[in-house]
Image: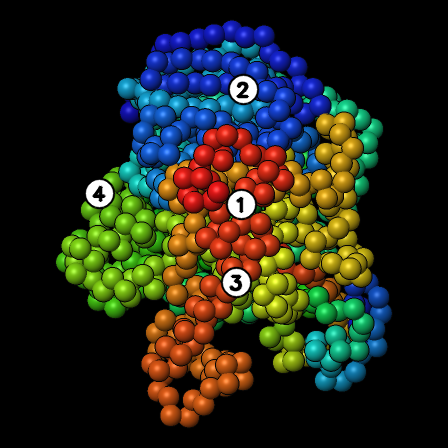
Amino acid sequence: MGHMQLKEIAATTYERADVNKGYTDQSLHINLDKADIGITPIDTAIKEKFIGGKGYDLWYMWNAVKGTTKWDDPENAVCISAGPLGGTPGYPGGGKSIVTAISPLTGAPIDSNVGGYFGPYKKFSGFDVITLTGKADQDTVILIDGIESNIKIFTASDLPDNSYEMSDALTRYFDAEKPVNVSVVTAGPGAENTYFGCLNFSWYDAGRKRVRYKQAGRGGIGTVFADKKIKAVVARFGAISMKTNNPADLEALKTVTKTHAKEIHELDPKQNRMALVGTTHLVPIMNDHDCLPTHNFKFGSHPGAAVIGEDVYEHIFDKGFDGCWRGCAVACSHGVKDFSPFTGPFKGTKVFVDGPEYETVAGCGSNLGIFDAHTILEINFYCDAYGLDTISVGTSIGFVMECFENKLITTDHTDGMDLSFGNRYNTLELIHQMARGEGFGAIVGKGIRQMKQIFAEKFNADAAFMQDIGMESKGLEFSEYITKESLAQQGGYGLALKGPQHDEAWLIFLDMVHNFMPTFENKAEALHWFPMFRTWFGLCGLCKLPWNDIVPEDNKQTEEPAKVKKHIQWYADFFSAITGKKTTPDDLIAMSEAVYNFQRVFNLKMGYGTREHDTLPYRAMGPVTAEEYESRQERYDKQLIEKYGMNISDMDTDTKVAALRKEREAQYEQLKGAVYERRGWTQNGIPTKETVKRLGIDFPEVLEVLEKNGVK
Amino acid sequence: MIQVDDKPVTWHQGMTIADLLEQMEGVGFCSVVRLNGKLVSSPRFHETPIPDGSIIRLLPLVAGG
């Protein structure tokens, strides 16, 4: 590796738009084909309808792509927006970016919500949203410099090839004196060589004097970024205060910010202690409730989980302030310093690991039968440095391991590697191979949907069995919760627009543990309300954790504790204070519903978005194998007898598995119908004309897509 | 005596977490508690004894990731 070289190939200066009530009303477009830089105003009608964040991303992407666009076509657009509330220092979770693209895994729009300072810096530099289209012919770095008011495009050579070093090098290159002014978005070699590449969004941790990062993980947006030959996008901006968003009512903003932050400071230590343990408290809780993915989602608990949860990580995490946004009281972005990997290019060196979070522990730990906190750290480190989504990595390798243990694939296919559950060394070797695009790792890096096809066609593996155990839906790998005993969460995954990620709805405990939604109609109502409210965070540039992971002490006495209505009122006040629009909690739902339905129609435009695509592998619904059934036989036998009225005395296990499957698949289909009806969709899962009209998204091009799909 | 969410509660020999919750009102939401700093989930409430002098926190509804 020589000395990093950046050669400027295009540049423009611009008059930085002042932020007014959370918006700059300007968009930045960079076309890599021609190194073209364009700045255009955002239409008021679009602002009213799409709000910002994911709404803006989807609108600009909709206009960039055709229905036939594939992920690696030049017109595919990577869009990044922070939303009108994003960039409010001190408001808990107030600094998120939302990133979208057409996904290499799903072929449809994917969105990812990520911390780090890039989104706010980009907005304060003058742009509510940026779109990146085209493809460069050389490695490229883009700089958005809000201090100097210029935008530059560079060709790049001799950059570090991993995100860990590249983020640091570019941060210091663009502002050595004040690295805190810089945030860098990078991918990595794993993004170049797999379909589930992530993006790392950085911030400079002034306390530790090092660059940290969080990941826009899902759906391979990093892969699209790398395919465009973008090595990095850099935003640079200076001092930030509550006034930087130029809120309509500064005093009201100060009041609601202080109120929410104070509550978290007081109650987090009494509740989930996220400022100490991040989300690792979920490991023992999920394990005890049989919801922790173990051995490719076969089981929900394991005795080894005791050594990969908060009890261990609390003592490993480096102490210090760990907010991924300035002043965030949740401060859950923990890391481990002086970690020494035992494999790979960083073997024997000391590195800082950003993480792990619950999803990584579950996906790359228990789901692989790896009950070792340090191996999980090493997997976490390399996935980030290579630019790989830890969720897709963990869920994909879990699938591979179960295929291996069932002899669907053998060492003849895996380059001689034993990929039985629990094999730590070969798991890491597989990840190194993925990053290099070599060996069996290159196949695994294509994701479960493609692996199923390759294993069946080339290795003669049992396609039906792989369909049952391959934990993907819509092409996206599942995030890390067992849903077998929660029909509502099966819907939360199966009906999620982008695929099985839990950020739309997380209903397991409301449904499975508390039985707060016993009927199909109750579940359908939850699968309407929760996705709509959760979508709102993505429109505004916020994190959802402060909403319902730390709750008021009197929340349990409220009418609907799961909604944490006091906080929803605070969010409405927050929106009012910044934008100057008097806003009620119901208004937040209305904002989301329009964007949510637009995304569903966008799926339809891309050839998806109908009932047949809202399917699940059977493992998400119930026991696929006799081994699974017998491991929880008392539970399943009881259901067959009491819930379904069967006489099971003469049934063997395989017959019981089949009987239970028939019932559970039928109830999932019934749930889909109830949810579609509640959402104002046809029974084929398409928004009706009345629905899009009611929501004000009845644009001619939307109606055209509906009509093409038989909705008159 | 034990402390539950900063309030004193009378303790008795053999008291489990399930026993404690049964005598309290408005705890239907509770599926996880912290018993002297350690998480205990509802499947273990019946089998988990509370030592005298314990400090217990009732965690809010589990909200996932």
Q: Chain of mark 1?
A: A
- Closer to the camera, A240 or A48? A48
Disc 3 versus disc 1: distance between alpha carbons?
Answer: 19 Å
Q: Are marks 1 and 4 in one subunit? A: yes
Q: Mark 3 or mark 2, which has the lower sequence index?
A: 2
Q: Give the vertical position of A695 relative to A83 (above or below).
A: below
| Residue A569 occupies quadrant | top right
Near mark 4 (Cα within 10 A), the count class, few <14, some 14-19 or many ≥20, is: some
Residue A281 percent location from the top left of the image: 59, 58
Which residue carries the number 1 mark? A688
Disc 3 versus disc 2: distance between alpha carbons?
Answer: 40 Å
* Front position among marks 2 and 4: 2
Which residue carries the number 4 mark? A438
Horizontal side of A166 relative to A322 (left or right) equals: left
Q: Secondary structure at mark 4?
A: loop
Q: Chain of mark 2?
A: A
Question: Mark 2: which amino acid?
Answer: Ser
Q: Which mark is residue A671?
A: 3
Question: Mark 1: which amino acid?
Answer: Thr
Q: Mark 1 or mark 2, which has the lower sequence index?
A: 2
Horizontal side of A256 relative to A125 (left or right) equals: right
Q: Give the vertical position of A594 relative to A1 (above or below).
A: below
- Closer to the camera, A459 or A495? A495
Q: Secondary structure at mark 2?
A: strand
Residue A528 percent location from the top left of the image: 60, 52
Which residue carries the number 2 mark? A27
Q: Are marks 3 and 2 in one subunit? A: yes
Q: Are marks 3 and 4 in one subunit? A: yes
